[in-house]
Image: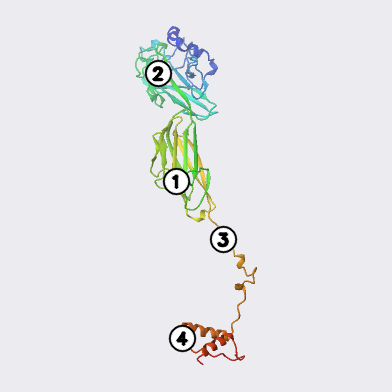
Amino acid sequence: MSKKHLLTFIGGIVAFAFALLPFWTVSAWGPERTTYTVESPAPYATFNSITDNPAVGDERNFVRIGEIGSGGVYRDEIEIVPGKEYEVYIYYHNNAAANTNSAGYGMATNTKLSSAYPTVLNAGERGMVSGIISWSYVTPEDPDNAKTGKVWDEAYVTTNTDGVVLRYKTGTAIIHNSGQADGSVLPTALFTESGTPIGYNKLTGTLPGCAEYSGYVTYTLVAEKVDVSLDKQVSLDGETWNKNINVKPGDYVTYNVKFKNTGNTNLTNVIFKDIHDEGLSLRSGSTLIFDVNNVDGMKIDDIIDLSGYNVGNVAPGALVQVIYQVKVTEDISYCGKTLTNAISAKFNSTEEKTDEATVTVICEEQTEPTPNPEKNCKTNPEMPECQELPKTGPLEIFMAIIIIAGIGGGGYYLYRTRKTLNKVESIAKGDDIPKGETPKTPEQ
């Protein structure tokens, strides 16, 4: 391998960018392996093990990242800012000497590249962008038995903002070399554990040794901010909304949920789920979804408190509203209790936000009726109904019997002579009754 070959392709592309980085910035590469130099290349196919590459320095540090628009400067670590785009750079080089290719020892087969990056990054976290090169090869000492090799390296990303999403920009994973495969777009298998084949003229995984067959892969990551607002309120009349209201047993209350994507990234698979305390139950057929596709509301099945409801993707700035009713239990044992109804909004598979509203069950107190002071005999003993009734003696009892009998007889005794009536009245008054004598009835 000659310096001329090395600098012809690589020097004009990345020498400036990589020369800005000293050797001590080498990131977490691996594994520990035999290293080589430009003057003393490897006797068989091996990757990224030359330590004095004039363009890139130590090839073990082969994954770097830079902000697009920064002049092509790539670094081992960079701070991510939402709204900007970043380019990942992965260098590959089969370090075998050129004269080993014809013998077969310098030829790498089944060469694949794999890469990974963090999808969500929060403030204070340090995310890893990785590159893994794997291949098959034979050695002069054992030409009949193929071996496998693997090398890897990492660059790092940080941020000062919570909820930053890194998203691959579709179609930007491109291989760059001096062969016919130059400019080819790599499939998304690049971001799988098994990786995707790379090559010189074709992406078949075959790469000869020497700098003229080296190259690099770039792809773009878009930094986006995940931010949502979620608000849940409750109402009895559908007009006045609060975080808590007083209710009676058996009342129906309405919940109003507003979910807005306030970030600059598309939210995927947004799922709403209602979680409520015992004593509350979803009113069948009451759940409505309002969004850009359903401005008049769409009625959904009664699943929001079971499996939840997936509204799909929510674009930046979009609002989704969910309205549904819940019945308060009629069980008076809940009187005085505060019952919570929460809403969960899950999105992007792992993200979740919740909010809640509450109702307090108020029951009417059962009290003894208050006595009317005007009819209180203790405070108004002079009232007629408070006067002590005359005590009844034998005569009074006897006359009561006579009067009742007369009424029961349809006036028969009143039809009798005036004398008899006068006697009854006289007896009723207690006149002319000797003491100790039993009064007689009119018939006696």
Q: Residues within 10 Å of mark 4 (few under 14, many from 20)?
A: few
Task: Report helix, strand or loop for mark 4.
Answer: helix
How was this image coloured?
rainbow
Q: Which residue is mark 2?
A: 174
Disc 1 or 4, which lies upstream in sequence? 1
The amino acid type of the residue labelled 3 equals Thr
Task: Report helix, strand or loop for mark 1.
Answer: strand
Q: Nearer the viewer, residue 383 or 231?
A: 383
Disc 4 or 2, which lies upstream in sequence? 2
Frontmost of labels 3 and 2 is: 3
Frontmost of labels 4 and 2 is: 4
Label 1 with label 2: CB-CB less than 8 Å? no
Q: Residues within 10 Å of mark 2 (few under 14, many from 20)?
A: some
Mark 3–mark 4 distance (CA, rounded to whole Å): 52 Å
Disc 3 or 1, which lies upstream in sequence? 1
Task: Report helix, strand or loop for mark 2.
Answer: strand
43 to 328, vertically: above or below: above
Picture coordinates of residue 321, whole percent (x, y): 44, 38
The numbered dot on residue 325 is 1
For the point 48% across and 29% down, the residue is 263
Q: Which residue is mark 4?
A: 412
Picture coordinates of residue 418, whole percent (x, y): 51, 89
Q: Which residue is mark 3?
A: 367
Disc 3 or 4, which lies upstream in sequence? 3
Mark 3–mark 2 distance (CA, rounded to whole Å): 82 Å
